[in-house]
Amino acid sequence: MAVIKKFRIKSFKNINSIIEFENVSLAYGNRLILDNISFKINEGVSFGMLGPNGVGKSTIFNLITGLITPSNGKIKISGEDVTHFPVYLRTKKFKTSFCPQYGGFFNDLTLHDNLKAISEIVIENKKLRNDKVNYLISRFELDNLKDIKAKFLSGGQKRKLVIALALLSEPRVLLLDEPFAALDVLTIKMLQQIIVNLQQETKISICLTDHQASSLLACVDSAMILSEGKIVAQGTPSNLVKDTNAKNAYFGDSFKFN
Ligand SMILES: Nc1ncnc2c1ncn2[C@@H]1O[C@H](COP(=O)(O)OP(=O)(O)OP(=O)(O)O)[C@@H](O)[C@H]1O
Ligand SMILES: [Mg+2]
């Protein structure tokens, strides 16, 4: 089993950006949510977004996936301007997978049938499809739950299902909106391991957000702090927790990373 990063930052040999925001603003009516933000996520890196409720983290995922378009600015995936690309093209061409903050599965299908339904869309060959579904069920230790309707799974089991669904298509970019929400300590550890292992084994790029700041910082290479529509700090976890702007806007003085 891989060890949780705990500030063991790997070397960033690959400096191609996979996701890039260039001067992006987004307003709902006259409420400016994102104010001219620019950032890059490099290929093969796991990147965290932190910030208070309502700051615009899910909005950033919606902008990356194409569910909404910015009021101003450019969004690039793999260097290509995708600002006006539809959702399906971003998913297909750049192999992006999104685990939303809520839902993301069929309530009335069993866990197995959820995976089967999505696999039928994304994997053509029947044998490969079945193999992949079975692999993910065992990888996520969901074997004894596979015949349970998704709506009856616990919060943590649902999160695992949604991540397994996202991995069916072997994404190059995995977007996780609050994967640790409402999970117990051991399940968070398991998900952190999954995230770290995925990145190390398959070299995918991962972008995640969560209010469990310690849990997030333990499994990312770098992160940014959002506050009042702006990025107020960016860097490696070890540098971020020492950053004065990050402390003032988000961590406070008593935050301890362990
Ligand atoms: N469709 C919409 N119409 C109007 N306002 C919206 C819409 N979607 C989001 N917002 C507003 O945009 C802001 C950012 O919302 P967002 O969901 O991105 O926050 P968040 O950082 O993900 O918060 P949380 O940590 O609570 O999940 C909020 O003030 C929200 O009310
Ligand atoms: Mg959100």
Image: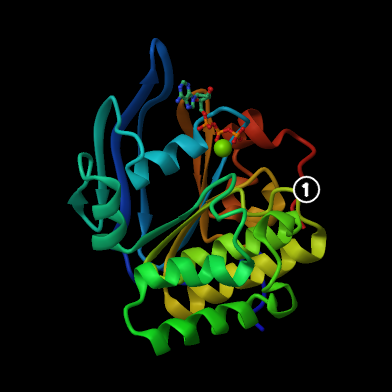
Relative to residue 185, is residue 149 drawn left or right? Answer: left
At 21% across and 45% down in the image, what residue appears?
A: 85
Q: Quadrant of ligand 2?
A: top right
Q: How many marks?
A: 1
Q: What amino acid type is highlighted by mark number 1? A: Lys
Q: Position of residue 220 (x, y in %)?
A: 56, 60
Answer with the quarter of the image where residue 62 lies: top left
For disc 1, the neighbor class at 10 Å (few under 14, some 14 to 19, many from 20) is few
Q: Position of residue 59 (x, y in %)?
A: 45, 35
At 65% across and 72% down in the image, what residue appears?
A: 193
Please name the colour scheme applied to the rendered image. Answer: rainbow
At 30% across and 30% down in the image, what residue appears?
A: 70
Q: Position of residue 7 (x, y in %)?
A: 62, 63
Closest to the observer, 144 or 235: 144
Q: Which residue is mark 1?
A: 256
Up the image or down, 26 lies above or below 64; here it is above
In the rendered image, the residue lying farthest to the front is 108
Q: Position of residue 221 (x, y in %)?
A: 52, 61
- Give SS at disc 1: loop
Visible in this render: residue 52?
A: yes
At 38% across and 13% down in the image, what residue appears?
A: 29
The residue at label 1 has a CB less than 8 Å from ligand 1: no
Relative to residue 228, is residue 85 drawn left or right? Answer: left
Quadrant where the C terminus lies? bottom right
Answer with the quarter of the image where residue 111 lies: bottom right
Answer with the quarter of the image where residue 92 lies: bottom left
Quadrant where the N terminus lies? bottom right
Visible in this render: residue 9?
A: no
